[in-house]
Amino acid sequence: MSASIRLHLNSLRDMNVTYMYFKIEPLSLSFKIEHNHSEWDVHIHPEGARYFSHRTRRIFTDADLCNPEVTTLVASFIEQMDEFIRAQDIDIPDTADLVFDLIRGESDNRIFCAYYFADHANRSIFWLDTYYARYFSIWSEIKGATSVSHVGHIIEAQYWYHCQLFPNCLPLTVELVDSMRDLLIYTIGDMVTSAVSTSPYDMSDLQQILTLANNMRKNIATSKGVAPGSISSLGRFMYVFVQQRFFHFYGQPSARLERNRSVYGALISRRTLLITSLSPLLFFAPEVHLSALEKIWVDNILNEATWATFISKLTSEWQEFILYATVLLNANVAFLAIQSVDEASSSPSRSAAQITSYLSVITSMGASYSDYSLSTKPSKAKETSRDALLFLNAQSTKCWAWKRCRYVQSTVCLLMWGMVSFLAAFSLMCLVASSATVRVLVGGGWFIIAGMVLWCITISGMRKTKSVVHVGHKLWSTTLESTRGENTRFRTAHS
């Protein structure tokens, strides 16, 4: 096993669900854990977990040594490990910790022992058997990791996870805290000077972590190096930072220096014929959200800070659209209440202005309900970056589901069509069955306003397609690629 892959589902720690009675004897002053083992010390992790450490050897376990049967099993496994080391003449570093964990098999219900060594001198974990990197949970998230130095970042991350689990294994020193402080100072500087920093935390979190590191340094003298809370927190932060090095190919020729850059070359997002043809009808809203999503979701890696900013902005937009849709709905109700517009209500037929206003009411209600549902209901894609990453990776493997996911985020198109329908209804009321003077004045006003709107759209960069000819060219290119059977989602720029 590794430090982060420690199975608890099938471990020997299930509690009794039966209601129990407990009698407290008179003058009971001490409530410490009693295990009656002279060779082991019991520790309570600051988070609440209980673990044991050997008094004369660097051995740790969170097996329940208060249980005599478990203690016998652990002693047997330690003896077997010692015999194997002596038989193979293996030299274990003096700075290495040995961690045991008892696990129950899923199929045969047998109990076996999992282990790993953690070396403090090299900040790494190791085994006496062959261990395959695919056993690490994050190995499948990165492709192309072949060098030993690259895989070494996973190993170091596992070491820091070990320090987080067993904080009494490492003394708190000035060098240790200063190393993390230096890393934090650089990361804060990188966040200040770069808008696309690879930092796993945002600026406020980094400032808080730096404050904690400064407080840790103050506790070194008073704690005399024994500070399980500080070591556990330090190990947790270092685990995150070092693990990010693996994701970003730290120290490799193709290291990612900006979070929106791929290490596999310049990637070109491919659009299908359906998406390309429907985007103009949806005011290019799917393209806007998809482009923003592709900037923060690079190489199947999702940054916690950027995802939080993205989903916060998106939720804020949905809430604003609810207000806009409500205002538009009220405007349509007021418009339909005008006597000249409602004059056809006595007959089954309706005027063109009424029909387009009805369409505006439908689209505005649809936009309001959709935005309300997306902004209030919990979603796996909104909870954490890890949940969002699993959601996006699952959708990307399902072609049609991924296409639909692009439009779920673009309910703004319903609001836009509602506005267009309302403006069309208002224009029909002004232009149909009216005098030439009214038509000239209204038509001239519409011509000037339309020119101003198109000019604003052009200079703001919101218009992805500059001309109808360009749209046709994209449609034709996409059709040719589809007929050739090119179904891959990305293509490298130099392929």
Image (cartoon, grey):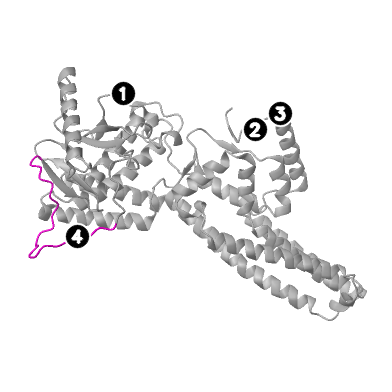
Q: Could you say whether the residue bearing mark 4 is in a helix, strand or loop?
A: loop
How would you rate the neighbour count of disc 2 (Cα within 10 Å): few for under 14, some for 14-19, many for 20 or more? few
Q: Quadrant of residue 318?
A: bottom right
How would you rate the neighbour count of disc 1 (Cα within 10 Å): few for under 14, some for 14-19, many for 20 or more? few
Q: Quadrant of residue 141?
A: top left
What separation in Å lies between label 2 and label 1 (alpha carbons)?
A: 38 Å
Depth check, mark 4 against mark 1: the one in front is 4
Depth check, mark 2 against mark 1: the one in front is 1
Examine the rendering and report whether any part of residue 167 can be seen: yes
Q: Which residues are magenta?
A: 19-39
Q: Could you say whether the residue bearing mark 3 is in a helix, strand or loop?
A: loop
Residue 89: x, y in percent?
A: 16, 18
Type of residue at label 2? Answer: Asn
How would you rate the neighbour count of disc 3 (Cα within 10 Å): few for under 14, some for 14-19, many for 20 or more? few
443 vs 245, left or right, is right
Determine whether label 3 and label 1 are within 8 Å by CB.
Answer: no
Which label's residue is closer to the chain start, 2 or 1? Answer: 1
Residue occupied by mark 2: 487
What separation in Å lies between label 2 and label 3 (alpha carbons)?
A: 9 Å
Q: Quadrant of residue 480?
A: top right
Magenta run includes residue 459: no
Residue occupied by mark 3: 484
Magenta run includes residue 33: yes
Examine the rendering and report whether any part of residue 466 can be seen: no
What separation in Å lies between label 3 and label 1 (alpha carbons)?
A: 45 Å
Depth check, mark 3 against mark 1: the one in front is 1
Residue 130 marker: 1
Residue 289: x, y in percent?
A: 59, 51
Q: Residue at x 15, y 41 (%)?
A: 53
Depth check, mark 4 against mark 2: the one in front is 4
Determine whether label 2 and label 1 are within 8 Å by CB.
Answer: no
Q: Residue at x 52, y 33 (%)?
A: 265
